[in-house]
Image: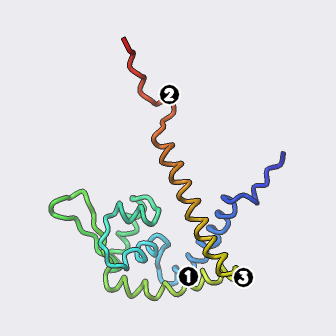
Amino acid sequence: MKYPYRDTVPYCITQISTVFNEVVSNRLGEYGISIPSYRALVVLQDGVVRTLKELAQIISVEQSTLSRQLGAMVKEGLVTRTRPEDNGRIVRIEITDRGRQVIEKLIPAIQNLEEVMLEGIRQGGIADLKSNLKQIAQNLQKLRDTERKVAPAELREPEPALD
C-alpha cells in the first residue's frame, strides 16, 4: 500500500511551518532578530515579567536555546535578565523600551504575512481552522503527557514481591 503522506495533517503543517518560518526569518533578518527572539518580544510586550522557564514554555523553545538568544537580546538592549536575591536559580526576563519599539515595528510585517497566508479562506473558515489547530495541539499535549508518565517496561522499577 502506498501511504498518502502528502495528504496527512502533520505533513501539511510541516510544509506550512517550513515556508512560513523561512519568510518570517527573512523579514526579521532585516532587523537582526531571530524567530525565537521575535516570539519572546511578542510575549513580553504585555509587560508581565516572565521566568526563563515560563517564557521557554510559552514560545515552545528549549531553555538553553532561549538563554543564548536572551544573551544577545540583552546586549542589543531589547530585554533585561535578572535573578531575584531570594532565589538565584530563577531568571526573570523583562522587555525594555527599546524592545517595545522594535516589536511594534515588526508586528505589522508579520500580521501582513498571516493575512497573505490566509487569503482566499472565508472568515468562518479561518476561525474553524484556528479552533481545530488548537484542538489538535491539546490532543497531542495530552498524549505526550500520558506517554511521559508511562515509561517503557524495561525502564520501570520492578514491582515488589507480595508475601
Which of the 4 quarters of the picture holds residue 48? Answer: bottom left
> Which mark identifies residue 27?
1
Looking at the image, residue 72 sits to the left or right of residue 1; the answer is: left
Residue under the image location 65 percent in, 64 percent down: 13
Mark 1 element type: helix
Label located before the other in sequence (1 or 3) = 1
Give the position of the C terminus as an image quadrant.
top left
Amino acid of disc 3 = Gly
Against 150, is 124 above or below?
A: below
Label located before the other in sequence (3 or 2) = 3
From the image, tell me which residue sits under label 2: 154
Residue under the image location 43 percent in, 73 percent down: 37
* Badge 3: residue crowd in 10 Å (few <14, some 14–19, many ≥20): few
From the image, tell me which residue sits under label 3: 120
Q: Nearer the viewer, residue 12 or 96?
A: 12
Which of the 4 quarters of the picture holds residue 104? Answer: bottom left
Label located before the other in sequence (2 or 1) = 1
| 1 or 3: mark nearer the eye | 3
In the displayed orientation, state which residue is furthest to the top: 163
Model colouring = rainbow
Looking at the image, residue 85 sits to the left or right of residue 57; the answer is: left
User: Picture coordinates of residue 85 (x, y %)?
Assistant: 15, 63
User: Picture coordinates of residue 24 (x, y %)?
Assistant: 57, 77
Mark 2 element type: helix
User: Picture coordinates of residue 109 (x, y %)?
Assistant: 54, 86
